[in-house]
Image (cartoon, grey):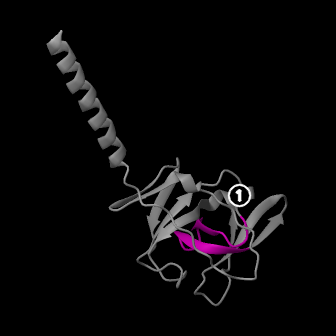
Amino acid sequence: MKWGVIIFIFFALGFMLASAGFLLLDNSVTAGSRLAYSPTQVQSTQRIPFEAIKVYPDEVKIQYPGLQYAKVKSDSMAPLLTHDSTVFEKVPASEDEIALGDIISFYEPSINSIVLHMVVGITETNGKTYFQTKGIANEEIDNWLVPFENVKGIMVGMFR
């Protein structure tokens, strides 16, 4: 009986220490808040829930299904994105998810490449939606219209 009590105490103590250690493993950094002051009101869409992002001292985890990422290869989106940036994208389910000001990646057949530019216009022709795009650093609007089926993703985050 005495050994049973001792074993039980060690088992309970070990379980408590293991549980406490498990709780200590979640050493995520607490998020702060910042004010980007402007009198301008902008319609914004939160595509990744804030709670899905966990930042740790040595890594960042985004717990959201279907994200993809890509390395930016040019400076047409400078100063926001440069050739050293990495972008995170969500694949849109419909053209209704894309709004003016969004940054989208899309296949452009005239240059046989996937381009990452900002949506500056949305038009409809014969019941089909097209997106007019522009690189932030470019003076001119792109000379193509992007059909929804060419859209590869909507930028939801980035690292520079």
Q: Amino acid at mark 1?
A: Glu
Quadrant of residue 134 in the image? bottom right
Q: Secondary structure at mark 1?
A: helix
Residue drawn where x is 57% and y is 63% of the image? 156
Residue 12 position, x and y percent, is 27, 26
Q: Nearer the viewer, residue 31 or 116?
A: 31
Q: Is residue 126 left or right of residue 28?
A: right
Task: Report the magenta residues as a range.
Answer: 99-120
Q: Which residue is mark 1?
A: 97
Residue 46 position, x and y percent, is 65, 60
- In the picture, which quadrant includes the C terminus? bottom left
Q: Is residue 114 left or right of residue 126?
A: left
Q: Nearer the viewer, residue 76 or 25?
A: 25
Q: What number of labels is visible?
A: 1
The residue lying furthest to the left in this view is 3
Assign the magenta stretch its main secondary structure: strand
Residue drawn where x is 66% and y is 57% of the image? 149
Q: Residues within 10 Å of mark 1 (few under 14, many from 20)?
A: few
Quadrant of residue 33 in the image? bottom right
Residue drawn where x is 63% and y is 79% of the image? 36
